[in-house]
Amino acid sequence: MGITNITPSIKSHFLNLYNLALSDNTIDASELELLYKIGLEKGIDKEEINEIVLSPGTTIIIPNNIEEKISNLYDLARLAWADEEIKVEEIELIKKFCSKYGFLDENVSDIAKYLLEKAKENTPPEEILIQIRKFI
């Protein structure tokens, strides 16, 4: 493969994940492991992820639909729990992305809390999307 096969949206998503991992100024091995696992789930190999984070040059791309928004936010929540502890910086960054993705300010904290709880429980991403589809 090569980085040219990756859409700007996917590249943006992985940069967002990487930024979350960096939000506490350190990247834990478990965070990197999960970053690569999420990449594999989305058909992106380790080398491509390395290319993305080493040569970012992209802006945040807002997903077009609610399912993609929730999926991306849930990946952030999963990564936040990768080292088995949540830091204030990680919560704030997830809330920031909720706002950027167009969720109402009064719902941002609840969305972040819900996704972080589900990530702590290791809920499969597909199950989160099934639950969300009931409300859209």
Image (cartoon, rainbow, N blue to C red):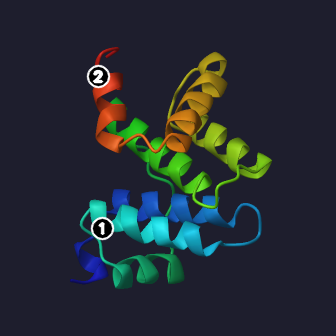
Residue 39 visible somewhere in the drawing: yes
Q: Tag 2: residue type?
A: Arg
Number of marks in the image? 2
The dot on residue 64 is none
Q: Position of residue 83 (x, y in %)?
A: 64, 61
Residue 65 visible somewhere in the drawing: no
**Could you say whether the residue bearing mark 2 is in a helix, strand or loop?**
helix
Residue denoted by label 1: 40
Asked if 136 appears above or below 80 in the picture, the reply is above
Q: Position of residue 20 (x, y in %)?
A: 62, 58
Asked if 32 appears above or below 59 in the picture, the reply is below
Residue denoted by label 2: 133
Left or right of 74 in this view: 2: left
Give the quarter of the image for residue 9.
bottom left
Which quarter of the rendering shows the C terminus? top left
At a point 29% along the width and 71% down the height, the residue shown is 44
Nearer-N-terminus badge (2/1): 1
Give the quarter of the image for residue 25.
bottom right
Q: Position of residue 15 (x, y in %)?
A: 51, 65
At a point 22% along the width and 74% down the height, the residue shown is 5
Q: Position of residue 106 (x, y in %)?
A: 65, 16
Q: Nearer the viewer, residue 118 or 65?
A: 118
Other residues around mark 2 within 10 Å, as few (<14) / some (14–19) / many (≥20): few
Left or right of 49 in this view: 116: right
Asked if 126 appears above or below 13 in the picture, the reply is above
Q: Nearer the viewer, residue 9 or 75?
A: 75
